[in-house]
Amino acid sequence: MIPISVLALAVGLLQAFLLGCLLYQLFLALASLLPRSSLPPAEPPHLRFAVAIPAHDESLVLPATLARLKEQSYPSSFVDIHVVADYCTDDTAQVTSVAGAIAHERNEGPTGRKAYPLQWLVQRLLEHEPPYHAIAVFDADSLVDADFLSIVERHLRCGRQVVQGQHVIQNPHDSRVSAMAAVDMRLNNRLRNLGRSNLGFACRLMGDAMVFDTQVLRERGWPTATFNEDREFGYELLLRGVRAYYVPEALSYGQAASSWHQAEPQRLRWYRQVPAMQRRLAWPLIAASLRSRSLALLDGAIELLMPPYSTLTALAALNLAATLVLSVWLPAGLGWLGVWGSACLLAGWILYPVLGLVLDRAPPWAFRALLLGPAYLLWRLWIALLVRVRGDRIAWQRTQRREETHAPR
């Protein structure tokens, strides 16, 4: 039987870990309030952009996406839109051409991951003449703000080599699930990306609204081909001294799954690669941060290793339950002091997303969506468990678009 003192020590260590994680997250939240560095004044444009869109059977959503990209305030003579129709069984390539974009059909090579067509297309774009200065990556359903490229161009002129725009969920009112996904994205943007960029750390690449200086891609290519290729690429770049910079003014609107059934394979795909990514990249990030005394590298390691919010909140609830049980055996003063501390810790984790929405000045519907928080948290824990059980048996599945689920019969 494990001695009570050992159990008490384990609970105390868990409580200290949870408190440290919460304080670090609150520190990043406060950093999101810091003033941002000013940009140079607008100049006559001279940077040439290639817009890269990987697409698999996306003929229903591409017309709106391409129409919005054609409305960019940045001069169209400096922008080419490229769509790779990857193993398509519909008329994605034809829809692309009709909309005035450049279609590339890919029907050979590995398939089943977004990274494969991106690698293939990026290599072609790097060989283009005249050469492009930057490549912007969007999803097939992205509705890009008209000033996106104009804003990003000014950041590139400042010497920033990788820029991450703000990805916004465009369909929060479709269902409670999409509303919660929109809240989740708001919190990621505000509490994770903005705070880190304000401190000079690297933000997380989100897969959409990413812009790369072509020199970075010439040196590194698109090296990752996992289900989490965007996030993994961000860590690879950070190890080589390139930090992704978050620009909230550069907006791109994308869709979220509107049901648990549609969202589950997407989340499984995102979570599947995380354990392998942690094993492969966490120690190199820590070692590099110690060698160079870089807080940005250390933050990258912390961000990679820190459990997700759902796991931390569940651990805080478990910690409270454990301290309640141990209070029966421990001296009354110390035991109940631990209970109150654990209760405050759990309250802190529960209120953390509320703080994020307040800082983000979120609309009322976002606060109402938090009422689904407990169910969403349990669902996220279920996804994490499925990843551990299924492992490599998780296969890629295409996420259904709103135009398909709401299409007229």
Image (cartoon, rainbow, N blue to C red):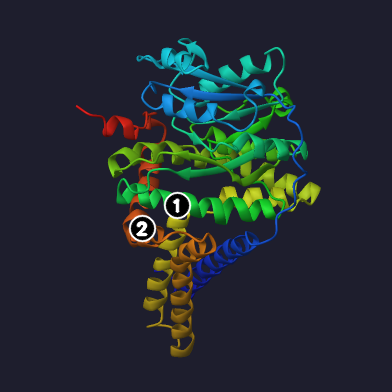
Q: In which quarter of the image is the C terminus?
A: top left
- Above/below status of 119 relative to 381: above
Q: Earlier in the sequence, mark 2 or mark 1?
A: 1
Within-10-Å neighbours for mark 1: few <14, some 14–19, many 20+ = some
Q: Nearer the viewer, residue 298 or 326?
A: 298
Q: Is residue 383 above or below residue 403?
A: below
Screen quadrant of the N terminus: bottom left
Q: In this view, does 404 lie to the left or right of 188?
A: left
Res 184 label: 1
- Residue 278 in view here: no
Q: Could you say which quadrant of the image residue 134 lies in?
A: top right
Please count the marks in the image: 2
Task: Identify which residue is drawn at 45% across, 22% down.
Answer: 55
Label 2, residues with CA under 10 Å away: few <14, some 14-19, many ≥20: many
Q: Report the amino acid beneath label 1.
A: Asp
How far from the left and from the top, in percent, is residue 205?
Answer: 58, 40
Instruction: Looking at the picture, tell me which residue is in the foreground, 143 or 146.
Output: 146
Q: Where is residue 58 in the image (x, y as percent from the top left)?
A: 39, 23
Residue type at tag 2:
Ala
Q: Which residue position holds label 2? A: 369
Q: Residue at x 31, y 51 (%)?
A: 176
Q: Give the CA separation, mark 2 to mark 1.
A: 10 Å
Q: Which of 260 and 89 is in front in this view?
A: 89
Residue furthest bottom in the image: 333
In this image, 174 relative to 198: left or right? left
Q: Residue at x 44, y 31 (%)?
A: 141
Q: Which mark is residue 148?
A: none
In the rendered view, does 238 fall on the left or right side of 1?
A: right
Q: Which quadrant holds residue 217?
A: top right
Q: Is residue 105 visible?
A: yes
